[in-house]
Amino acid sequence: MGLSNTRKAAKSFVCGGILSSFVRKVRHKMANSNQFPAALNPSESDVSKMLVCQVHVGTRNLDAAMERYMWKRRSDGVFLINLQKTWEKLVLAARVIVAIENPADVVLISGRPYGQRAILKFAKYTGATAITGRFTPGTFTNQIQDRFVEPRLLIVSDPRTDHQPIREASYVNVPTIAFAHTDSPLNHVDIAIPGNNKGKHALGLLWYLLAREVLYLRNTPALSRGQPWDVMVDLFFYREPEEDQKPEEGVVAEIAERPAYDATAEGAGAEWSAGAPAQEWAGEGNTAAEWTGNTATEWGATEAAAPAAAGWDGSAVPSTNWDAADHA
């Protein structure tokens, strides 16, 4: 069965609710070949989601350390990842995360933009610490830094992109969990979860499954094993900035489609013409005369009263001229 038929079978199950025989076969094979109890086996929905999100699709390059996680190679040279190994490593990583007493001691780092939203959601639901954006060298080793942390466990999205925190974690003996692609180097990585970490849907789904498995193992009251999680996997997917602007563009388009104001409409001209009575405007024509008369009277009275005003010391101002007083 080719990859195109595989996608069609998985999509028919997810979208139409039809149980795919291919998904049954894959799940049955995974359940018989692994050594986990039946409660830890993936459900048919989980297998179909991993197929639709192309978690198993790798690249044409293969690292020697990742060869054990490969299933086969397609005719076009692309390696396919064994989903059974992916699920086993997901459960193992979840058991390691649950063993940490303080969830805040688990540090999440994603240098790829596709994984930054996923680690924020993972930190929200599990209580871990997410470091987004550029990783500052010395965060794990330089105690003078303001952002210095001492984690007990490090989880990264890509060993190649996040090589700096992996190297620093090895200096301070911090175990590392990483989502590894077919060509990812596994230097200083303790637990590698094989999967497609270059696709936004595949990487978001891997973080989603890991967060759900952690909540299952912690015996969360609102979530028990076998019960569907009320959090949608779409919240862990990366969203393009253009997608966030689409609602705003819709509002702008709606405003543009509204009819423009027509000043010639019925009642518009009458409202403006009846705004102010003509008598009020005409009655204000005597304002200039009132201002002229009042101003002349007031200024004249002020000049006449000025000689009789008292000085600074309260004494009367002399009526004689200063020059005349000096000659006298």
Image (cartoon, rainbow, N blue to C red):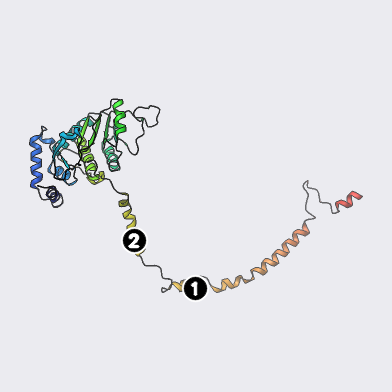
In terms of secondary structure, where does tag 2 sit? helix
Report if residue 232 is visible in the image.
no
Q: Residues within 10 Å of mark 1 (few under 14, many from 20)?
A: few
**Total of numbered circles in the picture?**
2
Q: Quadrant of residue 265?
A: bottom left
Local crowd at mark 2 within 10 Å, few (<14), some, or many (≥20)? few
Residue 209 circle label? none
Q: Position of residue 206 (x, y in %)?
A: 21, 40
- Which callout, 2 or 1, points to the residue nearer the camera? 2
Q: Secondary structure at mark 1?
A: helix
Image quadrant in which you'd find residue 152: top left
Res 84 seen here:
yes
Check residue 253 in the rendering and tell me which mark sits there, or answer none.
Answer: 2
Q: Residue at x 67, y 66 (%)?
A: 291
The disc, 2 or 1, on the residue closer to the chain's N-terminal end is: 2
Q: Nearer the viewer, residue 325 or 9?
A: 9
Position of 268 with respect to 29 (left or right) is right
| Coordinates of residue 13 in the picture (x, y in percent) | 13, 49
Kind of residue at disc 1: Ser
In this rendering, the answer to whether 243 lies above or below 134 is: below
Q: Is residue 149 above or below residue 295?
A: above
Quickly name the residue at label 1.
Answer: 273
Drawn side of residue 313 relative to residue 64, left or right: right
Residue ID at (36%, 62%): 255
Query: What percent of the width, then of the height, locates residue 311?
Result: 78, 49
Amino acid at the residue labelled 2 = Ala
Marks 2 & 1, CB-CB < 8 Å contact: no
Q: Quadrant of residue 141?
A: top left
